[in-house]
Image (cartoon, rainbow, N blue to C red):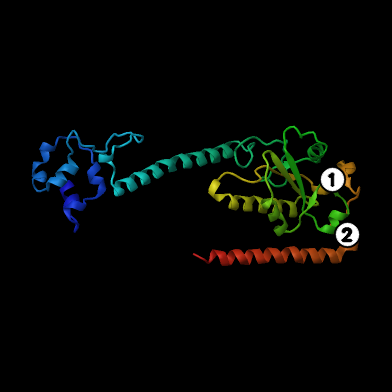
Amino acid sequence: MLLKRLFDTDDEFDTIPAFVSTLSFDFTPVKVNNLMSVMTPNIKRNLFPDDDDDSGLGMDDDITCTPSLQKSTKRQHEDDDNSRCSKRPKVCTDIKAVVTKLEENDDFIADGSRLHTLPTVTGKHSDLKSITPQTLADVVNGDYNDVISEYKIIDCRYPYEFEGGHVRDAENMYLHETILTLLRQPTKDKQIVIFHCEFSSERGPKMLRFLRSKDRELNKENYPSLNFPEIYLLDGGYKAFFNEQPDLCDPVSYRPMLHSDHSEDLRHFRVKSKSWTAGEKRRYARKAMRF
């Protein structure tokens, strides 16, 4: 078999593949005299180095060669490739460990670095972490200031709803393009983001998933790192919060999406949000066609 591997080729003998020079034999060279008899001295020397020659087998990576034993350029490239390959399993193992951790215990935040800061409840969306209006009130009142560095409350309702009453310190973001601005802002350790809409049944969850998707895309080379690994959904939305914590609303009021005085506003903002989403889908469709 070795003879076939060596000579079933059109290459010259002095260009034997690099793997041959590093073969490890479990028998002495004497047993292959017939093979050696047809080899040039250079081939013999490469296959069966003398005791004084560096065979490259069993050598530590951190050994420094003297100038007379410097590796050839080809050998150096091979070693570099082997070094890179040896690192890949470690990275894969780390990623696999994180994925396993997240699958086995969903109490970890999305990058697997620590547990969720806020207590969660089972909401309408099983794939999202939901908090109660009381927990959000505790955040606004500063009860978690010792364990979080910053919080953002993202109100995904339309502007006329937001102006008719919102959670104190909330930001109105009802367009996908506005959500993307979050990823351009400086990030901090132990910061949290809380999404909601009127009932937290459609607009809030969609925007939350959109941010997470874009965050993953932005950090795809550094998985599982994220700009915002800890995100929550307000269970019951603004309506539930207003019913329980009206004193933390500004102004102290609740304007529903289907308010009779804002039917024109509703049509306007629906068209605006849908047109941007459609444009985003077309852009990604064109991008997917580029190979």
| Of pointers 1 and 2, the one earlier in the residue sequence | 1
Instruction: Give the residue at x 76% y 57%.
Output: 174
Question: Taking 206 as reference, is 162 left or right?
Answer: right
Helix, strand or loop at mark 1: loop
Locate residue 4, reporting x and y percent: 17, 51
Is 284 or 197 nearer to us in this picture? 284
Q: Quadrant of residue 168?
A: top right
Amino acid type for the residue under numbered disc 1: Arg
Q: Which residue is mark 2?
A: 259
Question: Taking 42 as reference, is 70 left or right?
Answer: right
Query: What whole-number distance in Å separates the C-alpha atoms at marks 1 and 2?
Result: 22 Å
Labelled disc at residue 65: none
Q: Quadrant of residue 51?
A: top left
Question: Taking 200 as reference, is 102 left or right?
Answer: left
- Residue 260 lies, with reference to residue 89, above or below; the image says below
Instruction: Give the residue at x 65% y 35%.
Output: 115
Locate residue 167, reporting x and y percent: 84, 46
Q: Bin the neighbour count of mark 1 within 10 Å (Cα to Cα): few under 14, some 14-19, many 20 and up.
A: some
Whether residue 16 is visible: yes
Is 185 or 261 nearer to us in this picture? 185
Q: Quadrant of residue 129?
A: top right
